[in-house]
Image: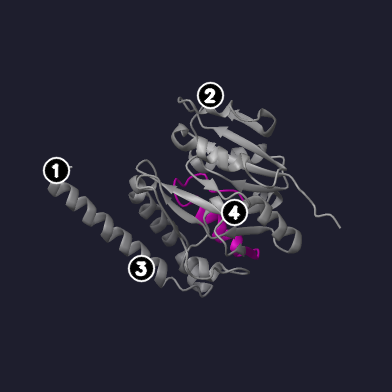
Amino acid sequence: MKKRSPLVSVIMNSHNGEKFLRESLNSLFQQSYNNWELVFFDNKSSDNSLKILKNYDKKKIRYFYSKKKLKLYDARNQAIKKAKGKFITFLDTDDSWSKKKLEIQINFFNNNPRYDILYSNYFIKDLNKNLTYKKHSKTLPSGRISQLIIKEYVIAILTVMINKRIIIRNKFNKDYEIIGDFDLFFRLSQKFKIGCIQKPLAYYGIHDDNFSKKKGIYIKELSSWLNKNQKKLKNQNYNLSQINFLILKLKVKNLVKRLFNLNLGV
């Protein structure tokens, strides 16, 4: 019996993301699985992103331009609404995928029809130092994993494939700037089983322009999220020691860095 080949919608949100865009697009257009569409949501860019995009097969691309700059997770929600595929995936302009990423994930869903959400291990790619290394060396969890996610968040959005009917009903919280992924997939993990591919299927790009400049916002949002949900989580017997320790560690590291920069006059 021939395996099903459902349409996959690849969500790419971009605001002036031209710097690494070609590498991301190349990794998509080189996929061994071909039944996909790119939903490119241009969040009021003023760079050459559209010019770069025009060098690729326009039949595979659906381009949307926002006249107003939206917060990241609002933009993600808007892009998802445009998607036509049965499954949704996410590829940001500074990330890339292994050649068989989509094929491996579709095969998983074909063989495991009770799952609607899937993630994988991935590589960290330092775009400044040209270094690549695997993110997780241990076996990653699958199934009902909300207790494990609150202890250690392991789901990276660039590795996720999710049934559209699930994410349409369970949107990103558009008020977040950083932790919208964590918030959404924790909520989903309380309702659904989540599958996992142990093999790294993607490359998460780190560079001067992304997360390192937003650690203060990350700490603030994660602390606020925990304060808001702490009572309910304790009543549900979640172990919060690990996430409390993470927040404390991040606060200390951020303070040390600020003091160091202050001494240097930065």
Q: Which mark is residue 160?
A: 4
Q: Is residue 25 above or below residue 129?
A: above
Sequence-earlier tag: 3 or 4: 4
For the N terminus, the image quarter is: bottom right
Estimate the spatial distance between the alpha carbons at disc 3 and disc 2, rounded to whole Å. Answer: 45 Å
Q: Residue at x 55, y 44 (%)?
A: 91
Q: Which mark is residue 243?
A: none
Local crowd size for mark 4, using a 10 Å CA cut-off: few (<14), some (14–19), many (≥20) = many
* Amino acid type of the residue tagged 3 in the rendering: Phe
* Amino acid type of the residue tagged 1 in the rendering: Gly
Sequence-earlier tag: 2 or 4: 2
Q: Is residue 178 visible?
A: yes
The residue where tag 3 is placed is 245
Sequence-earlier tag: 3 or 1: 3
The residue where tag 2 is placed is 51
Picture coordinates of residue 152, whole percent (x, y): 46, 66
Q: Nearer the viewer, mark 3 or mark 1?
A: 1
Q: Is residue 41 above or below residue 173?
A: above
Picture coordinates of residue 154, whole percent (x, y): 50, 62
**Magenta span:** 170-195
Picture coordinates of residue 55, whole percent (x, y): 58, 27
Local crowd size for mark 2, using a 10 Å CA cut-off: few (<14), some (14–19), many (≥20) = few
Sequence-earlier tag: 4 or 1: 4
The residue where tag 1 is placed is 265
Q: Is residue 232 visible?
A: no
